[in-house]
Amino acid sequence: MSRSQRTLLSLCGLAGFLALWELALRSGLLPGSLVPLPSVIPGVLWAEIADGIWLEVVTASLSHYAAGVLIGSLLGIAVGVAAALLPRFNAVHAWLARLLRPIPPLAWIPFAIIWFGINPSAAAFIISIGVFWINYFASHSAVRSVDPGYDEVARAFGHVGFLSRLTRVSLPAAAPGILSGLRAGLGQGWMTVVAAELFGIPGIGQRMMEASSLLATDIVVVYMLTIAGLYALFDFLFVLLQRRLLRWQP
C-alpha cells in the first residue's frame, strides 16, 4: 500500500468517526447537552481566537511546557549517559532511581506548590519530572547497548580519553535511542502540561477546567484538539530534525 493510499484511508477513517459522532448526537443516541456537535467546534475555536483567549492560554502553556521539556530532557540524558558509562555512579544512584521512578509527576504537585508557589515554575517542575525519566531510561539503554568493539576501535585510532570516546563513539552510536527518548518526552510533556495547570496556573488546563465547570464541553473539546494539534506539529518537526541528524545512517 502506497503512502498516499494510507493517508487517504486515514482521512476517511477520521471523517467517518466525525460523521458517526454528529449523527449520534442529532439522532438522540448521545446527550446533546453534555457532548458537543463536531460541526460547532470550528465556530467555537474561531470565537476563542477572536477574543484573544486561545492565543493567551496557548502561549502560557507553551512557556512552561518548553521549560519543563528542556530541563527534563537535558538532565535525563546527562544522568542516563553518566549511569551507563560510570559504574560507580550507577551503583550509587541505582536504588534512588528505583525509589523515585514509580512516583507519578502529579504526586509532586503539593511540593511544587510549596517550593515554587502557584506559578509557571511549578508547572515546569512537574513537567520536567515526567520528561526526565523517559530520557533517562532511553539514554541509559541506548548507551549500554553500544557494541564494546567500537571502543576498542576508537582506542586503536588514538581516542583513549573518556571525553574523546564519549563524543566520538558513545553518543553518536547511541544517538538513535537518545533521540527516540526525546521524541517520547515531547508527548509526555503535553500529557503532563494540562494536569500541571489544574491547580490554578494559567494555560490550557486552567481554561479547560473553567469551561468544564460551566458545562461548556465545546470549549473543552477545542482545547483537547489544540493539544493534539500542537503535539502533531512538534512531532512532525522533530522527525524532520531527527532524519537530518541521523542522515549518516544507512
Image (cartoon, rainbow, N blue to C red):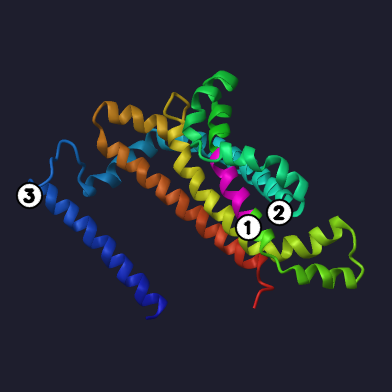
Q: Residues within 10 Å of mark 2 (few under 14, many from 20)?
A: some
Residue 206 shown left or right of residue 72 in the figure? left
Mark in the foreground, 3 or 2: 2
Kindly indicate the quadrant of the structure image that contains residue 13.
bottom left
Q: Earlier in the sequence, mark 1 or mark 3?
A: 3
| Residue at horizontal 66 percent and vertical 64 percent from the top | 145
Q: CA distance from mark 2 to mark 1?
A: 8 Å
How far across and down, in percent of the image, does residue 224 sit?
Answer: 36, 43
Residue denoted by label 3: 27
Q: Amino acid at mark 3?
A: Ser
Q: Residues within 10 Å of mark 3 (few under 14, many from 20)?
A: few
Residue located beneath label 2 in the image:
84
Name the amino acid type tagged 1.
Ser
Q: Are marks 2 and 1 in contact (CB under 8 Å)?
A: yes
Judge left or right: residue 154 versus residue 172.
right
The disc label shown at residue 141, or none? 1
Residue 102 covered by magenta stretch: no
Callout 2 amino acid = Ala
Instruction: Label 1: state its secondary structure.
Output: helix
First in sequence: mark 2 vs mark 1:
2
Nearest the eye: 100 or 91: 91
**Disc 1: CA contacts within 10 A as few (<14), some (14-19) or many (>=20):** some
Establish if 87 lies above or below 50. below
Q: Quadrant of residue 171?
A: bottom right
Which numbered disc flags the more N-terminal residue, 3 or 2?
A: 3
Q: Which residues are magenta?
A: 129-139
Furthest residue to the right? 158
Magenta-drawn stretch, dominant element (helix, strand or loop): helix
| Residue 128 appearing in the image | no
